[in-house]
Each structure stands twice: as structure tokens, then as C-alpha cells.
């Protein structure tokens, strides 16, 4: 209890004045309070997260039944972190939680506001054991990463049995390393005057990563194989490489803060080699390793803690934290602070992971970064299971993770959609990772997807990781014929509309993005963008080539709204590369023959007036109707407080034909897309194959960029029809757009009937025409040749 101060007309608690709780709402780039008010917990118990407060040394958390705290069912005290996952599951029911902080001198904040959440029946259980119990699970002897000492005898017996194929591959790799050991001289730092991001900088930055990985992953491979078969040549070479690398400057060319791309493989490579080859090391060599990794571990920890719990949207940090966890496990009890590194990493997993998605399985940064980061995360999953008995795959995210590549990349698709480095990627590239997820989840749909790319046996992890994972239990493949062909990944704001999941060469796909993550990190494309793929060809595309991260071309073209199929206003695009530039998918419906999705992105267009930031638009609502497979209707509503000129951007691999001022034709291979602007009239077309700015000279690719510019006005609607087809199989082109009081009525002829739709111009507009009625929202119906309804959609707001 605080001391009371008494003065004229004033009675206050001194402790309340001494330490105020910071309860500002979540801002852009912040994780936010979890569980969110009114939410259903994804796991039980949930991970609790709250805003840190300057001056707080420890925290207290209370959880009560119902809406008050008369019956407190859980209390945790003296918490150092502003995150906490309890050690026991909560039964189904309604709960309320709150927290308060205590300063170093004992002063206490007021309790936070109360926030409610529910635990539903069947919620997956994932409690975090208490710190001491968790750390006690880690072996005191070595090895500690991927395998435990008590497993060695069993694994040695199995190298002539069920694990012989994995062992033979491992031994073959070791023989190559013995015949040609990797160099171990310390790699160079950046030469004086090197410009960050330049090609000479990249050569050192990435080159040192590859150099370090070759040396230390090679050492770990040799050391692991020595543990299995006792081959002295393998063990001694592993020891020699390790000791050589331990003499590198810990804050030099491979220091984590100097070059994290080299620092991360150094840290996990040393940790794995150390724990595998430990019996062969002298005490002096062990002491050297401990001194070096104390410096390197502290450097990582200072960078990651405490920011990672509240502001975790740092791309590289999201694969650094579990590398720190590996260091902690390998050196637990041998290096001061190693216990804290382990506890930090485990809390990161339980409370703030995954970062770039919710539990629906998507990945904001795109499929290339999804693959890269999830592949590395699976190492940590293996490490946690072996060292601490934690099954990472109990997280709900991993029950859905394989649907992301499945819907984005039906077999034979050669485009990765939104995100950095996704152009021209092939679905087969991700079969190995999906095979691992399918085995962990026992998911037949994902296994079917893997099998479409070849014999599943070929999609086996190599090296010691593959050996530890062993001979996977076969999962029976299940064709996706029982699944809808389209899916919304709401956590990343992406809708993936397909005609088939079975073959990309037969598929027509529309991808739509309006993301709550904004345009930060590697998921930089503007909100309300779309892409079109048809019959094995990229028709309407995202453009540019990353010549170097953050280069002139990358930052000023690829991060800009101009690089995607979207709108600019008076030449101004959405605020680029910003967590605050958030969109929202407001509606989504999928049916067998007709899909629909809508997004809002008006607030992403900003202007500065009299030194103040303000929205440029009142709305930018984009609605997509997909009459599968032959027609895509895109309806855009743009509104502002004054007249503006809107530029409608489209991008293609080849020059876009412009037969007249309302129609276009896109060609790629033997596939075409006919485009008709039904409104507004009087558009001005302009196109070029130059970027602004162009990439560095070594990148020679060029793509075509067309703008259709409308006359300035306060409110404008674009109604645009896209008809993808194989050459020689052009669908009907008949379409009628009829203005109504408050909107439009649309009828479009299809090969097997027609699409009818009502498109409101106002949120209160009551429309009745073409056999449909609606108030304020888009409604559409697909009809057969006799005029009978096949499927109907109404784009009411998602709950």
C-alpha cells in the first residue's frame, strides 16, 4: 500500500503519482494487447501481452472468471517480461484479465483496464511450463540440440536400419568435406567507403553469410556424423573448423550487429558443432567457445529484448530470436545469461509468434519469405521438442499453414503472388517444406499437393536435420475435391480466388490484397491491389526486380503504388512501406461458380496541409466479382472532398494493345485478357516499358505499365471487365451498364449464361434492377442460359 499525502483539499496516493501505467492503444508496428477484448483465445492458456511502461521492474497479472475479479482463477507475480503464458490450461468459459506494474523502489501502478476473452471447447492446449521446470528438462550433458544423449545408442543402431538412407546421404556429405574442407580464415569487413546496399556492399554482406554457413554447417554435419559412427576423421575436422572459427572477432565481420546475415549462421553453427563435438574438445577450447558465445549471445539479446515482445515486426529479428534460443540451450549452465536467452526465446514463441499472420496460415511478407523463415523455424521446433518436450505444431497456425501455398500456388503455377522476391517462383520450390508440415499435421490435402510435384520420397530434408526427422510416417494423399477453390487469409488481408486447385495450367486465379499489416517489411505492395494468372501465364502482374534491398528502384518503384495494379490520385500513391498504411478486406464470399471480395484502402492516401497529415481520400473501395473462369469484374469507388484526377494502373509482361479509348488487350504466350472500361468515359491511355527509376544495369528485364487517366472529379467509379481466355477461344463481349439513382445495374453475357450485378454509388442507395435488390452493398447473381440462378453473392461486411 502507498503512503497517503494530505494537503488542502487534496488526498492522493503517493504511489499512484510515482508510477503511471502506459495504456495507450496499440499503434502501427505494435503487437497490441493480447488476448484482445472480446476475442476467443487461439490456445489455452492464451499468451498475455501488454504495453511496457518505463520504470516498471516487475509485473503482476490477474485472470478472473466472468466480467469481474471477485473470483480470481489465476495470478502471476514478479514477472520480468510484459508477456506471460500460464503453466496450465484454462477450462472453457469467459474470462477477464488485468495487470499492474511495480517499480524498483516498490511503488505500484494502478490496475490496468479489464479486458475480456473466452476459451471455447476444443481450444488447443499449449501451456508454458514454469521457468525452472522448463530449464531442468534440458540435458546437462551433450548433445542438446536436435538430439539428446540418451537417444544416441538408438540412433546408432538405426543407421543400418530405417535411417540408412538418411545416414548414407549424411556420410556422403562428410566424405566430400574431408576431401575438400571449407576455408576458415576470417572473412573481410566492408572496405572503407563502401555504400550500404551497393553491389560491392552486397558482395561482402551475402558472401560472408555463405562463407560462414559453408564452414560451420559443414563442421556441424561432420560432428553429428561422428556422434553416430565414430569416424575420427569427421570428428577431428569438425573440431578444427570450430576452433578456427572461434578465433574470429566476435564483433567483427561476422558480428550479429555488423552483419546479421553472417552473424546468425555463425551463432547457430558454433552452437550445434559445439554440442555435437563436445567430447573431443579440450577444456581450453570449451572455455574459448564459452567466452566467444557470451559476447555474441549478449549482443543478440540486447538487440532483441525487450523490443521483440511489443514491436516484433522486424523481418530479420523474426529468425534471430530462435537462433539465440539455440545458443542458450547449447551453453546452458556454462555461460552466464544462457538461461535467460532460452527463457526469452521460449516466451517469444508462446506469446508473440507467428508475427506475420494470425492462425489462418498466411504470411504477410510473401511466399518466398514464408518458405525461408518457416524452414528455419522448423529447426527451432525440432530443438524445442528434443530439449524441452515442447511440440510447436500444437499452435493453431500449423494446423492451417499448408493451405497458404496450396491456394496461392496450385501445382504447376509459376508466380508467387504478393511479397518480395516472388516473381516467377515455381510451386515445386516449396514441396519439401510442405511435406514436413503435412507429416507433422497428418494433413492429406497438403500431402496430395506435394505428390503432384513428384515422388514424395524426394522431398526429404538433407543433412543432420533430415536424419533427425527420420523416415517420415506416410500420410495418405487426399485430393482437394472436397475443398472450396477459393479462400480468404484474413490475417494477412489476401483473397486467393481460383477455378481449380489441381493444376495451375488449367487455373484462372485472381489474387487480391488489402492487408491489416499495411505495406511494411517485405509485404510492401499497396492495398486493394490485384493480380491475374490464367492457364499457365502471368497476365496482370506486380512489377520490378529487386536489385538490392532498399535501392532506388526497390524503394521508389517497387514499394510505390505505381508498381502494381491499383490507383494513384493526382500522381500520388499510398504511403509506401508503412505499417500504418493499412487496408481491410471488408467482405468475402466463395461459391462454386461465383466469388466476391471487397477491400477498403482510402485512408492509405495521405497529404500534408499546413504541416498536418490528413487523408487525401474519403474512400477507395474496390470490389472484385469472379464469374469462374471467364469474367472478372472490378468495381472501384473513389471519393474525396475536392476534385482529383485518378490514374488507373495496369501492368503486363508485354505491350498492352489499345484498340480504342475503353478497351485493352493483354497477351502472354497463348493466353489473352480482353479488358473493357465501362465507366468512366473519356479515359486517356499512356504506357511505357520503363520503370521510374530503372533498376541497376545488371537487371535487364522490362515490363509494361499502362495508366488510364480519368477527368478530375470529387467522386468517380471505375467499372472494368477482365476476360481471360486461351487464344482462339474468346468469350462473349456483350455487356450493359445502366446508371441508376444511386448506382449501376450490370449485365454481362457469359459462355454459359450471364452475370447480373447491382453496384451502389452510396452506402444508403436502395437499388432494384436486373432481378436483384440491395441497399448499399454490391449484390450479384450468376445465371444459366435459361436465366435460372446458379450462385448469388451479397457483399455484407465481415463480422
Image (cartoon, rainbow, N blue to C red):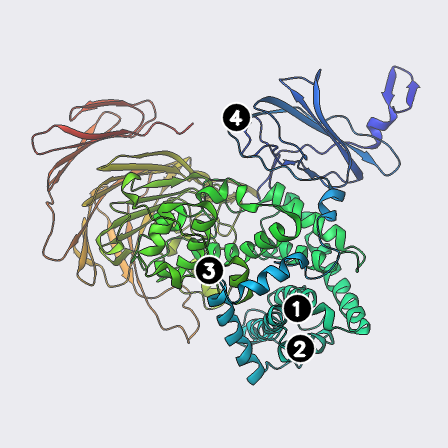
Q: Which of 415 and 746 is in front in this view?
A: 415
| First reached walking from the N terminus: tag 2 or tag 1 | 2
x, y percentage for residue 188?
A: 65, 79
Q: Which mark is residue 241?
A: 2
- The reply to whether the C-beta atoms of the residues labelled 2 and 4 are less than 8 Å apart is no
> Marks 3 and 2, Cα distance to the nearest angstrom?
43 Å
What residue is rendered at 27% in x and 37% in y? 595
Q: In this view, does 481 lie to the left or right of 419?
A: left
Most foreground residue, 763 or 387? 387
Query: Which marked residue is nearer to the observer: mark 3 or mark 1?
Result: 1
Q: Name the residue under label 3.
A: 556
The reply to whether discs 3 and 4 touch (Cβ–Cβ < 8 Å) is: no
Q: In this view, does 212 lie above or below 579?
A: below
Q: Which of marks 3 and 4 is in front?
A: 4
Q: Where residue 666 sits: x, y (%)?
A: 21, 57
Dot in front, 3 or 2: 2
User: From the viewer's perspective, is the residue at label 4 or at label 1 nearer?
Assistant: 1
Q: How far apart are marks 3 and 4 (CA)?
A: 46 Å
Q: To which residue does mark 1 refer?
A: 273
Residue 541 location in percent, x, y?
Answer: 32, 56
Task: Answer whether labels 4 and 1 touch (C-beta < 8 Å).
Answer: no
Does any portion of residue 490 appear in the rendered image?
Answer: yes
As drawn, the residue found furthest toward the left would be 786
Ranked by sequence position, the earlier of labels 4 and 1 is: 4
Amino acid at each position: 500500500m502507498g503512503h497517503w499525502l494530505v494537503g488542502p483539499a487534496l488526498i492522493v496516493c503517493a504511489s499512484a503519482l510515482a508510477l503511471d501505467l502506459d495504456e495507450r492503444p496499440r499503434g502501427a508496428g505494435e503487437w497490441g494487447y493480447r488476448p484482445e477484448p472480446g476475442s476467443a483465445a487461439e490456445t489455452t492458456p492464451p499468451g498475455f501481452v501488454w504495453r511496457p511502461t518505463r520504470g516498471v521492474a516487475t509485473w503482476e497479472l490477474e485472470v478472473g472468471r466472468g466480467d469481474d475479479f471477485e473470483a480470481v482463477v489465476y495470478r502471476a507475480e514478479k514477472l520480468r517480461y510484459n508477456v506471460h503464458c500460464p503453466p496450465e490450461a484454462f477450462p472453457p468459459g469467459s474470462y477477464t484479465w488485468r495487470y499492474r506494474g511495480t517499480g524498483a523502489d516498490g511503488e505500484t501502478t494502478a490496475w490496468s483496464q479489464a479486458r475480456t476473452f473466452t476459451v471455447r471447447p476444443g481450444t488447443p492446449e499449449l501451456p508454458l511450463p514454469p521457468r525452472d521446470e522448463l530449464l531442468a528438462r534440458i540435458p546437462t550433458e551433450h548433445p542438446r540440440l536436435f538430439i539428446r544423449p540418451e537417444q544416441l545408442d538408438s540412433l546408432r543402431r538405426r543407421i543400418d536400419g530405417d535411417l540408412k538412407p538418411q545416414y548414407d546421404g549424411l556420410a556422403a556429405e562428410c566424405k566430400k568435406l574431408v576431401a575438400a574442407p571449407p576455408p576458415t580464415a576470417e572473412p573481410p569487413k566492408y572496405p572503407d567507403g563502401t555504400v550500404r546496399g551497393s553491389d560491392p556492399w552486397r558482395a561482402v554482406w551475402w558472401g560472408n553469410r555463405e562463407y560462414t554457413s559453408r564452414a560451420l554447417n559443414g563442421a556441424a554435419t561432420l560432428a553429428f556424423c561422428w556422434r553416430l559412427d565414430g569416424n575420427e576423421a569427421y570428428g577431428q575436422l569438425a573440431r578444427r573448423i570450430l576452433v578456427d572459427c572461434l578465433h574470429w572477432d566476435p564483433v567483427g565481420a561476422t558480428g550479429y550487429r555488423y552483419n546479421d546475415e553472417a552473424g546468425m549462421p555463425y551463432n547457430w553453427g558454433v552452437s550445434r558443432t559445439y554440442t555435437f563435438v563436445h567430447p573431443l574438445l579440450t577444456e581450453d577450447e570449451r572455455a574459448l567457445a564459452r567466452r566467444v558465445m557470451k559476447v555474441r549471445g549478449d549482443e543478440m539479446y540486447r538487440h532483441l529484448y525487450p523490443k521483440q515482445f511489443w514491436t516484433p515486426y522486424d523481418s530479420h529479428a523474426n529468425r534471430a530470436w530462435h537462433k539465440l534460443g539455440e545458443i542458450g540451450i547449447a551453453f546452458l549452465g556454462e555461460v552466464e545469461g544462457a538461461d535467460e536467452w532460452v527463457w526469452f526465446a521460449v516466451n517469444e514463441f508462446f506469446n508473440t509468434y507467428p508475427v506475420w499472420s494470425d492462425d489462418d496460415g498466411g504470411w504477410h511478407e510473401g511466399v518466398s519469405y514464408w518458405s525461408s523463415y518457416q524452414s528455419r523455424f522448423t529447426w527451432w521446433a525440432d530443438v524445442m521438442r528434443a530439449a524441452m518436450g515442447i511440440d510447436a505444431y500444437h499452435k493453431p497456425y500449423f494446423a492451417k499453414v499448408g493451405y497458404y501455398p496450396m491456394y496461392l500456388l496450385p501445382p504447376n503455377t509459376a508466380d508467387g503472388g504478393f511479397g518480395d522476391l516472388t516473381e516467377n517462383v515455381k510451386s515445386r520450390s516449396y514441396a519439401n517444406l510442405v511435406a514436413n508440415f503435412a507429416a507433422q499435421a497428418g494433413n492429406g490435402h497438403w500431402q496430395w499437393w506435394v505428390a503432384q510435384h513428384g515422388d514424395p520420397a524426394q522431398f526429404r530434408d538433407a543433412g543432420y536435420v533430415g536424419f533427425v526427422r527420420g523416415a517420415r510416417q506416410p500420410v495418405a494423399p487426399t485430393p482437394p475435391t472436397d475443398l472450396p477453390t477459393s479462400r480468404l487469409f484474413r490475417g494477412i488481408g489476401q483473397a486467393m480466388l481460383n477455378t481449380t486447385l489441381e493444376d495451375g495450367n488449367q487455373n484462372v486465379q485472381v489474387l487480391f490484397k488489402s492487408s491489416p499489416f499495411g505495406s511494411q517489411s517485405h509485404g510492401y505492395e499497396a492495398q486493394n491491389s490485384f493480380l491475374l494468372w490464367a492457364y499457365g501465364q502471368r497476365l496482370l502482374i506486380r512489377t520490378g526486380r529487386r536489385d538490392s534491398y532498399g535501392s532506388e528502384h526497390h524503394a521508389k518503384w517497387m514499394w510505390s503504388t505505381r508498381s502494381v495494379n491499383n490507383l494513384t490520385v493526382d500522381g500520388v500513391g499510398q504511403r509506401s512501406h508503412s505499417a500504418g498504411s493499412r487496408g481491410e478486406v471488408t467482405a468475402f464470399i466463395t461459391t462454386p461458380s461465383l466469388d466476391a471480395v471487397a477491400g477498403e484502402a482510402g485512408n492509405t492516401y495521405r497529404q500534408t496541409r499546413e504541416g498536418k497529415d490528413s487523408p487525401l481520400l474519403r474512400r477507395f473501395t474496390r470490389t472484385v466479382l469472379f464469374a469462374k473462369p471467364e469474367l472478372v469484374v472490378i468495381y472501384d469507388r473513389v471519393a474525396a472532398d475536392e476534385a482529383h484526377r485518378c490514374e488507373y494502373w495496369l501492368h503486363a509482361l508485354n505491350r498492352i494493345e489499345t484498340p480504342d479509348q475503353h478497351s485493352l488487350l493483354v497477351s502472354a504466350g497463348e493466353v489473352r485478357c480482353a479488358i473493357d472500361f465501362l465507366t468512366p468515359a473519356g479515359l486517356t491511355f499512356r504506357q511505357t516499358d520503363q520503370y521510374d527509376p530503372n533498376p541497376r544495369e545488371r537487371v535487364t528485364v522490362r515490363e509494361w505499365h499502362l495508366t488510364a487517366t480519368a477527368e478530375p472529379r470529387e467522386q468517380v467509379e471505375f467499372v472494368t471487365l477482365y476476360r481471360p481466355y486461351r487464344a482462339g477461344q474468346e468469350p462473349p463481349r456483350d455487356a450493359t451498364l445502366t446508371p441508376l439513382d444511386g448506382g449501376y445495374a450490370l449485365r454481362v453475357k457469359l459462355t454459359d449464361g450471364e452475370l447480373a450485378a447491382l453496384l451502389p454509388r452510396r452506402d444508403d442507395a436502395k437499388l432494384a434492377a436486373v432481378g436483384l435488390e440491395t441497399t448499399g452493398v454490391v449484390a450479384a447473381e450468376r445465371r444459366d442460359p435459361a436465366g435460372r440462378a446458379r450462385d448469388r453473392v451479397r457483399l455484407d461486411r465481415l463480422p
